[in-house]
Image (cartoon, rainbow, N blue to C red):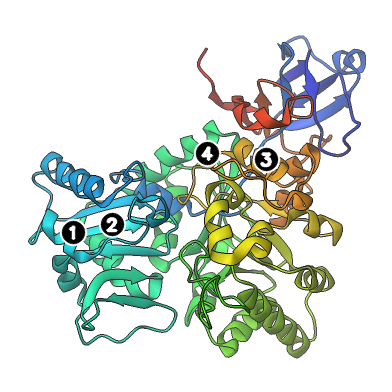
Amino acid sequence: MQKLYYGGDILTMVRKTDAPEALLVEDGRIRFVGGLTEAKALCGAKAEFVNLGGRALLPSFIDGHSHISLYAKFASFPDASGCTSFAELALFLKNCLKEQAECDVLLAVGYDHNFLKEGVHPTRELLDEVSETVPICLYHSSGHMCVVNTAMLRQAGITERAADPRGGHYGRYGDGTLNGYLEEPAAFAPVLLWVFKRIGQDPVRQLHEVQEIYLKYGITTVQDGGTSAETLKELSAAADAGCFRVDVVAYPLFREGTEQLLVEYGRYFRRYQNRLKVAGTKIFLDGSPQGKSAWLTRPYEGEESYCGYPTEEDSFVTEAAKSAIKQGCQLLAHCNGDAASDQYIRCYKRALKEAGGGTDLRPVMIHCQTVRDDQLREMADIGMLPSIFVAHTYYWGDVHLKNLGAERGARISPVKSALDCGLRYNFHQDCPVLAPDMMKTVWCAVNRVTRKGIKIGEEQAVDVFDALKGITVNAAYAYHEEHKKGTLESGKLADMVILEENPLKADCAKLADIRVCETIKEGKTLYRKEA
């Protein structure tokens, strides 16, 4: 089957100056990109001609980092992001209980203490007012903390005598009793495990539904970062059931037994099987800067000595790196604070030395919120890639200015520094933290404006073309898939997106308003915007 696209701007993402008149797709791949006359000469009698009508054709977008399995689970839970005070949260939760009268557990998502009138986290006292009998969990938008009521603490087995777990923290009242605040997965994992077992889940259906959201935003390659053994089983079942229309790349959490897990799911290891691929492993090295649990080398603003804290010892990080190098696969590391970035670089270099080097493995530093220029140069030296959560500039830029001070806060998500160091950065939204709105992310990288309208770190802004590279060609490179994705070139997969206008010609202030008209995977239209 042939389909010829013409009549609009075609952005190949190879060079900014490329301006082909036409693109010909044949049997799911791009056969030709160039002049319209030459393209027509290659068409058979049954070729379909698609007039773009002045719209723009680009490579489809590639998700640099998210959690599709968690997004699938959370998509059906009540969203508390619209609440602006404790009173509104309590009323919202009470209404949720009324609407779910037969439910014996409540999990709500999306609250952010930074945007509540009180400016602090609620406690179990507030949630106990909602219900003393139904276990309640209120999950933070960052994914790094939650608040639970007394009934939930009891069900999760978290007692007053419990000491803080390594890499996590239990909030307490002044008398030392638990206040229901749980910081980082090490602290709240028992809660989620109990909730997910209690609440009926249909992973195949949920995954099928949530991938439609990615497609709506022009994304055809999606990540599941930090996949548990149970979730990998669910992803495998979904793949075997023919669930996936997008490509899903999984990175199981590294822990004891992970190497055996990679053997068990060897049919997916570094290759797609029913649109699922296992590309490597992932580790968490710190927390969240907006939650002040990210691990910094200098104290948070207004603190004498508190710098956040690490999640793992150097020995564990080095072991994870050596395992990935031995397996010939990628290692992803969550690093928000620059101390965590130091640890990752230090341990990966040590592992490379002990292993005698690695061949083009492309380890990835996830988030990179406070990564320094000297660290970016070290990353370039060892082939480590930055996946930058650049949307922080808008969503939490004002919070970072408060928590990190003017200098560090303005420099979050240093994309231009990464570019200057020759690094192939990519972007992500860390779903379900944010919706996978790629054009919003491009807008953030170009404009660097906070919610309050403050310009921050303007020297770290990049132009539109370099921003688009972060969600196309560079993101393909991060998955070792640059030979078949990320640009519009002959021989590559016809993974494409049609935008209502050309971002290179649009008003930079309005980039986030550009809508996806159509998302195409291997020549087939999987999403089309309703007229």
* Kind of residue at disc 4: Tyr
- Label drawn at residue 214: 4
Of badges 4 and 3, the one in the foreground is 3
Mark 1 lies on residue: 127
Quarter of the image for residue 175 reads: bottom left
List x then y, in percent, for residue 379.
Answer: 77, 70
Contact (CB < 8 A) between labels 3 and 1? no
Contact (CB < 8 A) between labels 2 and 1? yes
Mark 3 lies on residue: 442
Q: Secondary structure at mark 3?
A: helix
Q: Earlier in the sequence, mark 2 or mark 3?
A: 2
Using the image as rendered, state which of residue 108 and residue 399 is in the foreground: 399
Tell me the distance, in whole angstroms, between the alpha carbons under discs 2 and 3. 30 Å
List x then y, in percent, for residue 235.
Answer: 44, 54
Using the image as rendered, state which of residue 142 and residue 61 is in the foreground: 142
Tell me the distance, in whole angstroms, between the alpha carbons under discs 2 and 1. 9 Å
- Label drawn at residue 138: 2
